[in-house]
Image (spheres, rainbow, N blue to C red):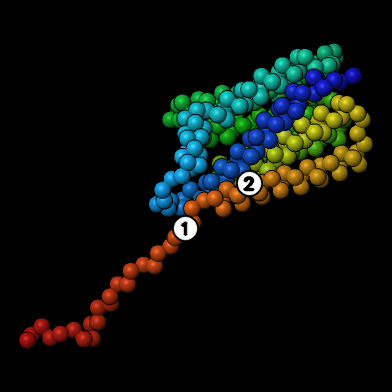
């Protein structure tokens, strides 16, 4: 029988993934508005506070640290939960393998932050795509838990995220898909992966829940992108100055 304590790691891990999704939605919208010129206005207290918060996030490897924290939470939950420890391959070993891949991705993030010349952004994306791919792969082929429908949907979500991250190497705008599927990933782990450990779920209920999770992730993505862009400074396009055209027909006679 699963208790609330055994489900808590899934809620915390899903919340961290949800946080990543919100962060990536903001970064997607900010990427496209960062090219706009800033208006020369006096900064209010709210703007100063926001700039201080941004300096905290930009001066520390927040994303890599969160991945390492999520790994620690997931590993502790795996060791203390009621997962089966018998069979050819232990379920605890399978879960620990997933979390260790995310720990590797977090380590690459930290190295990229402190040594950007040696560890490129491409390596960061490759490590993250690899961790999502392995998670989906193990949920499909390792028979991690009893509910195959929940696991198949989760694998599809994380494989879509992995594919989107890979495409970002040549198509930066697809980061929006990565953000949306990560929101879906976090909500699915916190809600459905936690729920089927407490009570049996019929496939019809799983399908309906997935539809509502997709709607919620899309709505959150839409709101964050719209709010971020609405708070951006407006692009003021000034008309170019008029350049006089030299009239060769009325050229004065230089012989005078």
> Which residue appears at 7% of the width and 85% of the height?
255
Q: Nearer the viewer, residue 219 or 123?
A: 219
Up the image or down, 113 lies above or below 156; here it is above
Of callouts 1 and 2, which one flags the residue occurring earlier in the amino acid sequence?
A: 2
Mark drawn on residue 224: 2
Q: Which residue is farthest left?
A: 256
Q: Secondary structure at mark 1?
A: loop
x and y percent of residue 207 in the render? 86, 42
In the figure, residue 193 lies in which quadrant? top right
Residue 120 shows in the view: no
Q: Quadrant of the C terminus?
A: bottom left
49 lies left or right of 14: left
Q: CA distance from mark 1 to mark 2?
A: 20 Å
> Which residue appears at 70% of the width and 31% of the height?
15
How crowded pointer 2 is (Cα within 10 Å; few <14, some 14-19, many 20+) is rated as some
Q: Secondary structure at mark 2?
A: helix
Q: Are marks 1 and 2 in contact (CB under 8 Å)?
A: no
> Which residue appears at 50% of the width and 39% of the height?
50
Where is mark 1, residue-wise?
A: 235
Q: Which residue is farthest front?
A: 45
Q: Quadrant of the N terminus?
A: top right
Q: Nearer the viewer, residue 23 or 106?
A: 23
Up the image or down, 193 lies above or below 225; here it is above
53 lies left or right of 87: left
> Which residue appears at 77% of the width and 14% of the height?
80
Mark drawn on residue 156: none
Q: Nearer the viewer, residue 52 or 72?
A: 52
94 lies left or right of 247: right
How crowded pointer 1 is (Cα within 10 Å; few <14, some 14-19, many 20+) is rated as few
x and y percent of residue 83 in the render? 82, 18
Q: Nearer the viewer, residue 4 or 88?
A: 4
x and y percent of residue 125 in the render? 58, 35
């Amino acid at each position: 029988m699963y208790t609330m304590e055994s489900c808590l790691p899934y809620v915390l891990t899903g919340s961290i993934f949800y946080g990543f999704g919100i962060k990536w939605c903001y970064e997607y919208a900010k990427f496209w508005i960062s090219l706009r010129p800033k208006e020369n206005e006096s900064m209010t207290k709210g703007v100063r506070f926001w700039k201080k918060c941004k300096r905290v996030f930009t001066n520390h490897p927040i994303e890599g640290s969160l991945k390492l924290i999520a790994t620690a939470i997931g590993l502790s939950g795996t060791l203390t939960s009621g997962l089966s420890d018998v069979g050819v391959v232990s379920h605890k070993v399978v879960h620990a393998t997933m979390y260790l891949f995310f720990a590797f991705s977090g380590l690459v993030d930290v190295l990229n932050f402190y040594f950007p010349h040696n560890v490129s952004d491409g390596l960061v994306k490759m490590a993250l795509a690899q961790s999502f791919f392995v998670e989906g792969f193990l949920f499909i082929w390792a028979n991690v838990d009893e509910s195959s429908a929940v696991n198949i949907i989760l694998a599809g979500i994380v494989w879509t995220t992995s594919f989107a991250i890979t495409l970002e190497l040549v198509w930066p705008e697809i980061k929006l898909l990565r953000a949306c599927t990560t929101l879906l990933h976090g909500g699915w782990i916190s809600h459905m992966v936690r729920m089927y450990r407490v009570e049996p779920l019929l496939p019809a209920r799983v399908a309906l829940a997935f539809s509502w999770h997709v709607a919620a992730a899309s709505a959150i993505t839409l709101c964050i992108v719209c709010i971020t862009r609405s708070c951006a400074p407006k692009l003021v396009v000034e008309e170019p100055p008029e350049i006089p055209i030299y009239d060769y027909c009325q050229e004065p006679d230089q012989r005078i």
